[in-house]
């Protein structure tokens, strides 16, 4: 089975207390896809605890993929 970063984020968030939030960072980033191709994004997202601390491994580029794996509508995700 291939590594799925978004599934890992889901497992991490399942053990996190509620109240975490997502911050959009307007800084360019590169992600590698399953075909080993580099995809450039002009931004990325990072998830923070209720205390405002970044959660390890919770940096990602595609909010729609996160919403899908969490089974939450994109509009219901708290993005600041």
Image (spheres, helix red, strand yellow):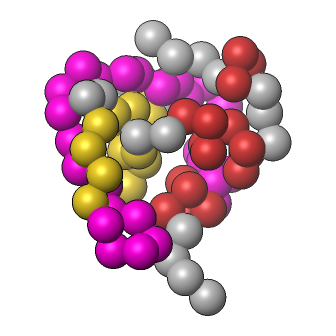
**Residue 44 sits in quarter:** top left
Q: Is residue 57 left or right of residue 3?
A: left
Q: Is residue 13 magenta?
A: yes
Q: Is residue 68 left or right of residue 15?
A: right
Instruction: Name above or below for residue 65 compared with residue 73.
Output: below
Residue 60 lies, in percent from the top left, at 41, 44
- Along the line of sight, which residue is nearer the eye, 18 or 60? 60
Q: Kindly identify the residue that appears in the image at 26 percent across and 44 percent down.
A: 40
**Residue 33 sits in quarter:** bottom left
Q: Is residue 45 visible?
A: yes
- Which quadrant: the C terminus? top left
Q: Is residue 56 visible?
A: no
- Along the line of sight, which residue is nearer the eye, 61 or 33? 33
Residue 42 lies, in percent from the top left, at 25, 29
Q: Kindly identify the residue that appears in the image at 48 percent across and 26 percent down.
A: 22
Residue 7 lies, in percent from the top left, at 62, 62
Q: Residue furthest top?
A: 80
Q: Kindly identify the residue that appears in the image at 63 percent across and 54 percent down.
A: 10
- Which quadrant: the N terminus? bottom right
Instruction: Name above or below for residue 73 compared with residue 70.
Output: above
Q: Which residues are magenta?
A: 10-37
Counting every numbered tag in the picture gives 0
Q: Residue furthest bottom?
A: 1
Instruction: Name above or below for residue 22 compared with residue 78.
Output: below
Residue 54 lies, in percent from the top left, at 34, 37
Q: Kindly identify the residue that appears in the image at 61 percent across and 43 percent down.
A: 66
Q: Is residue 23 magenta?
A: yes
- Along the line of sight, which residue is nearer the eye, 6 or 30? 30
- Along the line of sight, which residue is nearer the eye, 15 or 9? 9
């Amino acid at each position: 089975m291939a590594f799925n970063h978004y599934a890992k984020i889901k497992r991490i968030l399942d053990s996190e207390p509620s109240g975490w939030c997502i911050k959009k960072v307007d800084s360019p980033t590169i992600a590698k896809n399953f075909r080993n191709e580099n995809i450039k994004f002009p931004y990325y997202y990072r998830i923070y605890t209720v205390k405002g601390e970044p959660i390890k491994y919770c940096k990602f580029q595609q909010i729609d993929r996160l919403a899908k794996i969490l089974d939450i509508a994109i509009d219901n995700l708290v993005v600041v």
